[in-house]
Amino acid sequence: MNRRTALLALASAALMAGCTATPPTTAATHGPTAPDHSGQSLWHVIDGDGKTLTRLADDDPLVTAVRKTVVLHSGVVDNRDHRGIARSAADELDFYNKDFATKLRSQGYGGKLTELFTKNHLTTRQTAIAWYVSTFPRDRSTAKVSMESTIEFTTADPAYLKANDFSLDTPYTQRRTVSLARSGGRWLIVALEKEPLTRQVKTLPGAS
């Protein structure tokens, strides 16, 4: 991974072990992507072949617990300030199981993230979350959550923005697949897959 790719990956909070991401050389664009599922439940219990056995309501205790972990985690990784990035990086690791957190620490993840944010005076904020179809196996001991977070860069050095084709106060979306497992009464993240940050372009009324 070259330096430019590493910067893009970190900027989208995606430079971490167990995370699949292929950042673009320039920010891609698309319209709003919040899914329309026509009232259908997004939470499926599936068998070994991926066939849906049953669906769980949004207020099911199992769904509520998993959603809480994902929401809190995304709040930490998407709302970051260069003045408190070291603390934020440490807080992020609290959402991961032991193996995942140990792997990140061995790669110097916290230090690299801190250096990126402080060097380039980066601050980001989350503006929206969208949920997609997510699954539990038959025994409901693990979960795979598909979601999308929208963030904005609120501060950054001009040179950094230019080099990475980013803009301030512009929405960028990122699809994520968050894998979780029960651990001591908690739901912890064991793997994370993130797609590239994509610039969101508002669709004008009447546009086709």
Image (cartoon, rainbow, N blue to C red):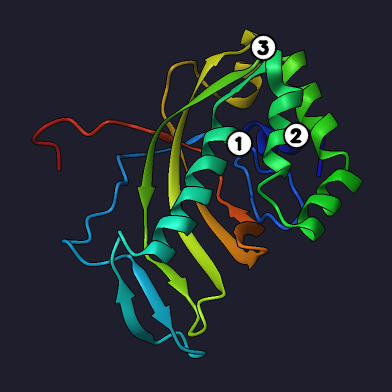
Q: Determine crowd level at label 2: few under 14, some 14-19, many 20+ residues with C-alpha closer than 10 A.
A: some
Write the residue at 85% across / 30% down: 111
Write the residue at 44% across / 71% down: 135
* Mark 3 residue element: helix
Q: Mark 2 or mark 3: name the one nearer the start of the chain.
A: 2
In screen coordinates, is 109 left or right of 66? right
Q: Amino acid at mark 1?
A: Ser
Which residue is identified by label 3? 159
| Up/down of 4 relative to 159, above or below | below
Q: Mark 3 or mark 1: name the one nearer the start of the chain.
A: 1
Disc 3 and disc 1 in contact, CB within 8 angstroms: no
| Up/down of 126 relative to 183, above or below | above
**Residue 94 x %, y %:** 70, 44
Q: Determine crowd level at label 3: few under 14, some 14-19, many 20+ residues with C-alpha closer than 10 A.
A: few
Which residue is identified by label 1? 12
Quarter residue 128 falls in: top left
Please identify, in this view, whether the residue under mark 2 or under mark 3 is nearer the observer: 2
Q: Amino acid at mark 3?
A: Ala
Q: Determine crowd level at label 1: few under 14, some 14-19, many 20+ residues with C-alpha closer than 10 A.
A: many
**Residue 157 x %, y %:** 65, 9
What is the tally of numbered marks visible in this picture?
3
Which residue is identified by label 2? 90
| Up/down of 35 relative to 49, above or below | above
Tell me the quarter of the image containing the N terminus: top right
**Residue 76 x %, y %:** 58, 34
In screen coordinates, is 113 left or right of 199? right
